[in-house]
Amino acid sequence: MAEAGWEDLELAEVSLSIAFLLTTLVVVVTPGTGVVYTLAAGLSHGRRASVVAALGCTLGIVPHLVATITGLAALLHTSVVAYEVVKYLGVGYLLYMAWATLRDKEALSVAGRPSRGRRPV
């Protein structure tokens, strides 16, 4: 009777592993915002803009990599105060960028931009 319990447990583990693998496959196959941005830049501005966009998206990972290598990520994970300080500095920076964008008169205007002809894909 004890063997039946172990078989049920092993079956449950296998079914959870299959569900996890399928979920992981869906997440990995689905394109993210970096892929969408790179494709949009390439289709609207050409190959060079697509390469620059891909490079920019790749370089966006560098701060996280540096934080992990230097141990800053572990410090922020263990210290609530340090995490809160970094979080509110980030909020302040985002608010500053929003304010600067709203104050810039030409940042949101699209009139007067010469249109480019369609390029074959």
Image: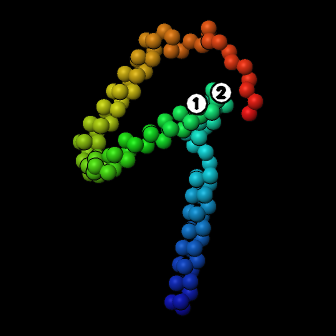
Quarter holding residue 60:
top left
Determine whether, in the image, residue 54 is placed left or right of residue 88.
Answer: right
Q: If the image is split into quadrants, where does the C terminus sit?
A: top right
Q: Residues within 10 Å of mark 1 (few under 14, many from 20)?
A: some
Q: Is residue 77 visible?
A: no
Measure the alpha-carbon separation of dots 1 and 2. Answer: 9 Å
Tell me where residue 30 appears, x and y as whole percent: 62, 48
Residue located 58% across and 63% down the image: 21
In the rendered view, would you say 10 is above or below 112? below
Q: Residue furthest front?
A: 48
Tell me where residue 119 appears, x and y as whole percent: 73, 26
> Which residue has dot 1 on it?
49
Q: Are marks 1 and 2 in contact (CB under 8 Å)?
A: yes
Q: Nearer the viewer, residue 108 or 82?
A: 108
Q: Residue furthest bottom?
A: 1
- The tag on residue 80 is none
The total of numbered circles placed on residues is 2
Residue located 56% across and 68% down the image: 16
Label 1: which secondary element: helix
Tell me where residue 75 appears, x and y as whole percent: 26, 49
Q: Earlier in the sequence, mark 1 or mark 2?
A: 2
- The tag on residue 44 is 2
The amino acid type of the residue labelled 2 equals Ser
Tell me where residue 97 appears, x and y as whole percent: 40, 22
In the rendered view, would you say 62 is above or below 116? below
Q: Nearer the viewer, residue 6 or 47?
A: 47
The amino acid type of the residue labelled 1 equals Ala
